[in-house]
Amino acid sequence: MDPELELLRAWREGDGRAGSRLFELHFDSVHRFFYGKIEDAQVDELTQETFLAVVRHRDQLSLHRSVRAYLFAVARHKLYDALRKQGRASPDESVAERTLEDIGPTPTSLLAKQQQHRLLLHALRGLPIDLQILMELRHFEDLRGPELAEALDVPEGTVRSRLRRSHRLLRERLEALAASPEEVRSTLSDLEDWAKVVRERFGEP
């Protein structure tokens, strides 16, 4: 059995240390998920709420599911609830289709010191939030088809079509923001390096 699913099995059977180990493995990723999407003061709070929700519903976690995909699915719902509570989106409005450029907090400059990284940050924030999350989970967290589908609660085929749309929209955004076609090309090729910077900034070597 996968080591994480073995930890999950042990946790569900009452081993508190196994649950703590699962949280340690995924704390940085969940914390990183919220950063830049919500006010800084709420990042720790929403991270904690995500893990508490998993504790309350741990019996719903199947031994055949991805733990991290489930965590991101919970985190996504927590984020959307928080944005609505802040009045950044109305209760009947689809937050997933809005952009953080429209309703999110101002991005923190320390996340993007290099020009290419600043361009990527602003381009990503111009995507619908669900597409931004999809790109970040794919490139920052290295989630693949089945896990992405679970985290976003959509069929795997939908994930593939959304990924194509996300890359197309990201390129279009960069073309509108960049000074030259060469800057667009170099910025797109820098996506993995940008992901590495983000991981290092938030506790993952």
Image (cartoon, grey):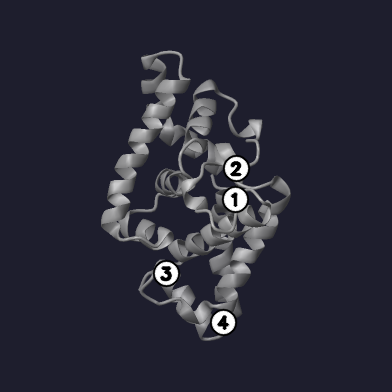
**Residue placed under numbered mark 2 in the picture:** 103
Separation of disc 4 and disc 2 at Cα? 41 Å
Position of 89 relative to 70 (above/below): above
Q: Residue at x 46, y 47 (%)?
A: 97
Asked if disc 2 and disc 3 are in contact, CB closer than 8 Å, the reply is no
Q: Is residue 38 left or right of residue 144?
A: right
Amino acid carrying label 1: it is Ala
Label 4 residue SS: loop
- Nearer the viewer's eye, disc 1 or disc 4? 1
**Residue placed under numbered mark 3 in the picture:** 3
Position of 16 relative to 30 (above/below): below
The image shows residue 82 at horizontal and vertical percentages of: 64, 56
Amino acid carrying label 2: it is Ile
Label 1 residue SS: loop
Q: Earlier in the sequence, mark 1 or mark 3?
A: 3
Q: Is residue 90 left or right of residue 151?
A: right
Label 3 residue SS: helix
Separation of disc 3 and disc 4 at Cα? 15 Å
Which numbered disc covers residue 89? 1
Number of other residues with Cα within 10 Å of mark 1, as a class: few under 14, some 14 to 19, many 20 or more: some
Task: Give residue 111's quadrant in the image.
Answer: top right
The image shows residue 133 at horizontal and vertical percentages of: 47, 48
Which numbered disc covers residue 15? 4
- Nearer the viewer's eye, disc 4 or disc 2? 2
Asked if disc 2 and disc 1 are in contact, CB closer than 8 Å, the reply is yes
Number of other residues with Cα within 10 Å of mark 4, as a class: few under 14, some 14 to 19, many 20 or more: few
Amino acid carrying label 4: it is Asp
Q: Quadrant of the C terminus?
A: top right
Separation of disc 1 and disc 4 at Cα? 40 Å
